[in-house]
Each structure stands twice: as structure tokens, then as C-alpha cells.
Image (tube, grey):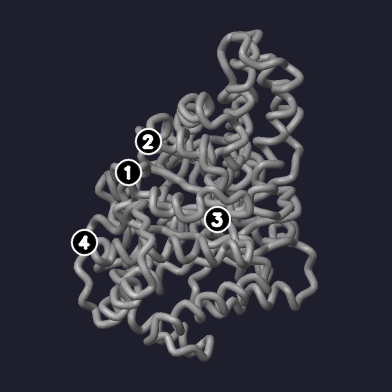
Amino acid sequence: MALLDENRLFPTDPSVRDLARLLFQSVNQLPIVSPHGHTDPRWFAEDRNFTNPTDLFVTPDHYVFRMLHSQGIALSALGVPRADGGATEQDKRKIWRLFAENFYLFRGTPSRLWIDHAFQEVFGVTVRLSAETADLIYDQIADCLKQDAFLPRALFKRFNIEAISTTESAIDDLRWHKMIRDSGWDGKVVTSYRPDAVVDPEFEGFTNNVQIMGEMTNEDTTTWGGYLAAHRKRRAFFKTFGATSSDHGHLSARTEDLSQAEAAALFSKALQGKCSADEADRFRGHMLTEMARMSIDDGLVLQIHPGSFRNHSADITAMFGRDKGCDIPMRTDYVTALRPLLNAVGGRSDLTIIVFTMDETSYSRELAPLAGVYPALKLGPPWWFHDSYEGMLRFREMATETAGFYNTVGFNDDTRAFCSIPARHDVARRVDCSFLATLVATGRLHEDEAFEVAQDLAYRLAKQAYRL
């Protein structure tokens, strides 16, 4: 029994479905450009077998364990490592059985579609995961993982990935990227410059992190000038490992364009740990403008990922650390927040700023109109909680009428789960083809144009926007 319906996500009207299917067939075999994500470069550097199904599908995937946690299943029972080194379940098969018993919780969610896709298309599973089939599927996947055909580099090729970007902290030594480069492997795995740890005064260890960056660059990062110089050197270092973008995960979309004297004073206060919450947000906002100016010089694309109240649960954060599924979308202002940045550099066509949102109410009211006027600004695809059939469709419906297709940047999967990459791109291509077929059926787009736009959305726009 197939786990996947071959007509999934296509329109129900037969004639529109037929066109959507034809459009999808025209892009289905295109290479995957994955310009933003969080896969581990160590996988590709060492090219070792993935250890077991649990470590591949359950323990590292916050989409999976947050749903299970919401039903009262402890993260420790799922083997999620504790920040304090406390005991967690280590029996991988036991964890898998618990996951399988509760797999029904994912009905109707994107995670269900992604997991079924990986089971069927990557591992040849043909039965639905349940308590009864848990061991059967575990053994089938485990047997596959022992084979050379399922090594990370082999899967990279099998998934038809043309290029993939990982995301590393500004003070990462990029050892795994160096190992990839030195190995001579021809797979294109690049990094992205993520400076949150050294631009956010509220980031744990901020002052120490800034000191480390100074030591890595031989710059005096206790001074404003030395701090900026250190950033420039780290960005240049990241570029030697293929970086084409920087990535900024801020609480708000606030930007500032302060005088150098104001910025230096605020930086000094941040180093001393004396910033109020508003001052910390102000400093982050100014650093976005500084990073944009650096991007004009070095060509890195600037990505802004705002509006997530990260680590909402104090208990989970204390016990398991950051990024454990307790991040919640927030209302986010863009019109006033981005104005200082856009007034400073938004009119430049030699700069690309890609803005994401988790506040869907901003698509038609704020983001699409902004992208529809400022040459530097582009809209990132539906992100995180909206990386779904409904989320993608809402994005196209609300953004296209004002921003068009060509002020957007195609799709990126933003994933830590390697085997979900083909599944996520499959979903995005199906949704876009369905949207295009509907435009044709309602007389808003010619059919030959739909085939061209489908190619752009599936491949060309991401490659062009991220300079890959």
C-alpha cells in the first residue's frame, strides 16, 4: 500500500488538477537548491552511517517532539539530551515504539506528510506507522542505514541536491566545512553567517562571545571600531567556505540607523550588561543596518528572521536548553520597523535583503507592498509554522497581487531533518503548481507563462537570490 496519494495537494477540480499535474511534472526532476537550513555539516564531512531511525526522525526534530510533548510525553522519554546532563531514555527502539504509538497525533500536519514521504521514497516503507508496525519499520530503516547507498553524501546525490547551505555561529571555526573542502568531494555544501551570539546583548554569554570573536580576528572588540572590523573579517572567512548569505534571528523586525557615536555608546553599555530590553532591541536593530552596509561591500545576502518568541517555556529551556520546540509566533510590525534600514539602503539594486515572517497578517498589509517598491527587499517563503500546504497557498494568495512572483525568492526548506528535504520541496512545488493552474483556469495567467513561472519558483529564483 502506498503511503502517498500521487495527486496529493492538487486542486479537486479535474481540469485544473490535470494542468497542475502537468506543471508539476515539468519541475519535479529539477535539482534542489536548499539555500537556507540547519543540517549538520559534520554529516557530509565525515560521511558516516546514520546510527538508527530514532536519531534520524525523532530525537533531533523539534516538529516531532513538540507535538508529543503537547500531549504530555516527556522530552526525556524521547531521548532529547538534557542541558544539565541528566538522565534521558537511551533505548532507541523503546523511543521509536513510543513515537509509533502516538503517530496518529500527526494526522493532517505537514510533519505527517514529510515523514510518510521519507518513509516511502527514501526507505521503501509501504505500511503505515503504528504500534503494530513499529518494529517492522524500525528494522527496515535500520537495515537501510547500514548500506553505503544511505550514507549522507550518497543521499545528497540521490536527493538531486545542487547546493545546500548550513548555518553557523559567527564564532564557529567551520572545521567541518574545512573537512568537506579538503576531502575533494564535489557536493556543494556552503555555510551562512549567523551572528546572533555576538549582536544580541540578551544572548547568553554575549560579552564572552564578543571577546572570542576578537581573539579569532586579532581585533580589539572592546571598541566599536574593532568590533565592526572583527565582523568584516569573520564574514570574509565565512565567504572562503562558500557563504553567500548572513542570517539574523531577531525578536522583532526593528531596525535603526544610529550615528556612530550613538552606536558606540550603546555597544559599550551592551558589553557591560547594562542594556534595558528596549536598548538591546535598539542595538540589534542598528546592527541589521550595519550588516546591510557590509553586504553592499562583500555581497552577502541579508536574511532577517524576526517574530519568534524563542524558548517560551522557562522550564524546558532550563532543563533542555535552547531550540527545543518552545518557540511561538508573535505579532510583528514591518512598516515602521524596517523604515530606517530601507531608507538607508533599500533603494539599492546591488543589495538583497530577504525578510521572513511568522505573522501572516503582515503579508498583504505590509510585506508585499514593501517588497513591491524597494529594490533591495525580497520576501522569503512561508517559514516554520507556515511551512505547509495552507501556509504556502495563503502566502501566494496574499503576496502575489502586490509583490508579484519576482519579488519573492522561491523556496527554502529551513530544516534540520535531512531526509525531509525532498519532501518539503515536493510540497512547495505541488502547491505552487496548483496555484499557477488556478490562475490559468481563472484567466489571470497564460498557460505558457505558468510553465515558465513554475520553473522560476522551483529552481531559478532561489539560485538567483542567494547567488548560488
Instruction: Single out the mark in the foreground, 3 or 1.
Output: 1
Instruction: Single out the mark in the foreground, 4 or 1.
Output: 1
Instruction: Single out the mark in the foreground, 4 or 3.
Output: 3
Q: Are marks 4 and 3 in contact (CB under 8 Å)?
A: no
Circle nearer the N terminus (2, 4): 4
User: Residue 457 appears in which quarter of the rendering?
Assistant: top right
Depicted 326 relative to depicted 15: above or below: below
- Find disc 1 in the rendering and name its residue: 333
Q: Residue 350 location, x and y as percent?
A: 63, 54
Circle nearer the N terminus (4, 3): 3
Image quadrant occupied by the N terminus? top right
**Closer to the camera, 400 or 204?**
400
Residue type at numbered disc 4 = Ala
- Find disc 4 in the rendering and name its residue: 314
Q: Are marks 1 and 2 in contact (CB under 8 Å)?
A: yes
Residue drawn 51% across the image and 61% down it? 292
Circle nearer the N terminus (2, 3): 3
Residue drawn 39% across the image and 53% down it? 340
Residue type at numbered disc 3 = Gly
Q: Are marks 3 and 1 in contact (CB under 8 Å)?
A: no
Q: Are marks 2 and 4 in contact (CB under 8 Å)?
A: no
Depicted 270 relative to depicted 258: above or below: below
Circle nearer the N terminus (4, 1): 4
Q: In the image, 221: left or right of 458?
A: left
The secondary element bearing badge 2 is classed as helix
Q: Residue 333 location, x and y as percent?
A: 32, 43
- Find disc 3 in the rendering and name its residue: 37
Q: Residue 235 location, x and y as percent?
A: 57, 72
Residue drawn 58% across the image and 25% down it? 8
